[in-house]
Image (tube, rainbow, N blue to C red):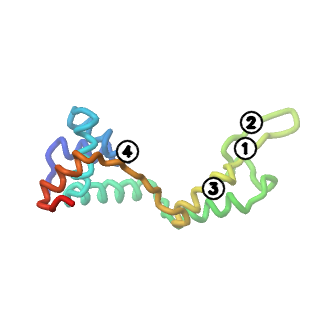
């Protein structure tokens, strides 16, 4: 199913940023409130979901790096001592020539641990609480046919 130009623009923006509201606001040139209300609805659209999966697949092909490869690199970053890293290593973030040889800056072990934990699902999902005013709750009850308590 072909998407309309705004849907396609939304998909590309969302794929790049991961921010539904901002992507919607840019694609549809609307207010933050309108974007916030409509972004979620658009992200539940089957055509949008399919396009986002397609964009992710295309990106994965271009990267030629699987999630297993990323996990391997992160584990290597965590376990490898700095002395074993040279300027040609994938773990070398920066190499600066100096008086006493080349100074190597390695990928952060703490950042690698955090990313590995995130990838492996060791963090609890973030909980976001929203305060709904009584007026809005009444409107929702009315719209859904629910009875007032």
Q: Secondary structure at mark 4?
A: helix
Q: Which of the image's four quarters has the C terminus?
A: bottom left
The tag earlier along the polypeptide, 3 or 4, is: 4
Residue identified by numbered label 1: 105
* Mark seen at residue 70: none
Residue 31 is drawn in which quadrant?
top left
Alpha-carbon span between mark 2 and mark 1 = 8 Å
Q: Nearer the viewer, mark 3 or mark 2?
A: 3
Of pointers 2 and 1, the one earlier in the residue sequence = 2
Identify the element where label 3 is drawn: helix
Estimate the spatial distance between the alpha carbons at disc 3 and disc 1, rounded to whole Å. Answer: 14 Å
Between the C-alphas of marks 3 and 4, the distance is: 22 Å
Q: Residues within 10 Å of mark 2 (few under 14, many from 20)?
A: few
Alpha carbon separation for disc pair 3 and 2: 22 Å
What percent of the width, then of the height, locates residue 75? 65, 63
The secondary structure type at the circle numbered 2 is strand
Check disc 4 and report the residue beneath it.
16
Quadrant that contains the N terminus: bottom left
State the residue position of label 2.
96
**Would you identify the image quadrant in which residue 98 lies?**
top right
Residue 18 to residue 1: above or below: above
Q: Earlier in the sequence, mark 4 or mark 2?
A: 4
> Whole-percent x and y of residue 60?
41, 58
Whole-percent x, y for residue 13 in the image: 31, 42
Separation (CA) of disc 4 from disc 2: 32 Å
| Residue under the point 72% across and 40% down | 95
Q: Which residue is mark 3?
A: 112
């Amino acid at each position: 199913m072909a998407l309309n130009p705004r849907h396609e623009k939304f998909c590309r923006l969302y794929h790049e940023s991961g921010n539904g509201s901002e992507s919607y606001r840019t694609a549809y040139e609307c207010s933050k409130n309108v974007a916030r209300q409509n972004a979620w609805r658009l992200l539940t659209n089957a055509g949008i979901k399919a396009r986002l999966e397609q964009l992710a697949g295309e990106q994965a092909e271009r990267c030629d790096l699987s999630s297993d490869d990323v996990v391997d690199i992160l584990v290597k970053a965590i376990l490898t001592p700095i002395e074993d890293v040279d300027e040609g290593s994938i773990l070398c973030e920066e190499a600066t020539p100096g008086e006493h040889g080349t100074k190597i800056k390695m990928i952060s072990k703490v950042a690698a641990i955090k990313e590995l934990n995130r990838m492996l699902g060791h963090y609890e999902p973030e909980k976001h609480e929203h305060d709904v005013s009584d007026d809005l709750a009444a409107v929702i009850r009315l719209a859904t046919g629910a009875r007032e308590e």
